[in-house]
Image (spheres, helix red, strand yellow):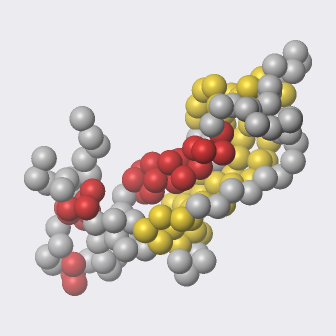
Amino acid sequence: MGVRFTEDLFVNTSGSTERTLKGRVVPAMMLYWYAEDLVSPSVEFTGQAFVGTNIGVKSPTVVGDTIHVSCEVIEPRPESKGQRGLVRTRNEIINQRNEVVVIYTPLRLVAMSPPPGNSHTDLSSKQHAHAALVVPPLLLGNAMSQ
């Protein structure tokens, strides 16, 4: 079962001239979903649990925008035994105009043992990960037909 965004703002392509926001606006939670998919390879093999996040929407995103995610470790908290720790990152979703459209700060429980192929896991360094994605109309366009 998929998530459907059926609010008129997201699926109605007619009458957009009367709206304050121009274009087919993408739901912020869908952007979050895309962003997490782009970021997930960076926590593969180490992520153990998602604890929570705060999300702030700064600007609208429309279908056809290209987004990428910039991640920075802002709060590393290794546990006393050193086998795992909590890591909070600041993730910025940025569009093709270099505008930050969403900021979210997930907190994850991660394994402190090194992932396969790496010699160590360093929670204290500031790390950045970038990946890009063009927001497709397909998922929004099919929301009403399901």
Q: From what the image shows, is residue 53 above or below residue 49?
A: below
Name the residue at the top extreme: 81
Tell me which corner region of the image, top left, top right, bottom left or bottom right, holds residue 108. top right
Q: Is residue 138 left or right of residue 65?
A: left
Instruction: Choose between 105 and 33: the one closer to the eye.
Output: 33
Query: What x and y, as percent, mark residue 81?
Result: 87, 15
- Tell which residue pokes out farthest to the bottom in this image: 17
| Position in image of residue 66 (x %, y %) | 47, 72
* 16 vs 38: above or below: below
Q: Residue at x 40, y 53 (%)?
A: 30
45 displayed left or right of 26: right
| Residue 61 visible somewhere in the drawing | no
Q: Position of residue 100 (x, y in %)?
A: 59, 69
Asked which quadrant contains residue 65, the reply is bottom left
| On screen, residue 130 above or below 110 | below
Instruction: Report the front residue among 116 and 128.
Output: 116
Q: Residue at x 39, y 66 (%)?
A: 135
Q: Position of residue 8 (x, y in %)?
A: 19, 61
How many marks the image carries: the answer is: 0
The image quarter in which residue 28 lies? bottom left
In the image, 9 versus 82, the foreground residue is 82
Q: Evaluate whether residue 66 shows in this view.
A: yes
Q: Is residue 65 left or right of residue 67?
A: left
Give the residue displayed 14% in from the left and 76% down from the top: 14
Q: Residue furthest left?
A: 145
Q: Residue at x 80, y 38 (%)?
A: 118
Quadrant, the N terminus: top left
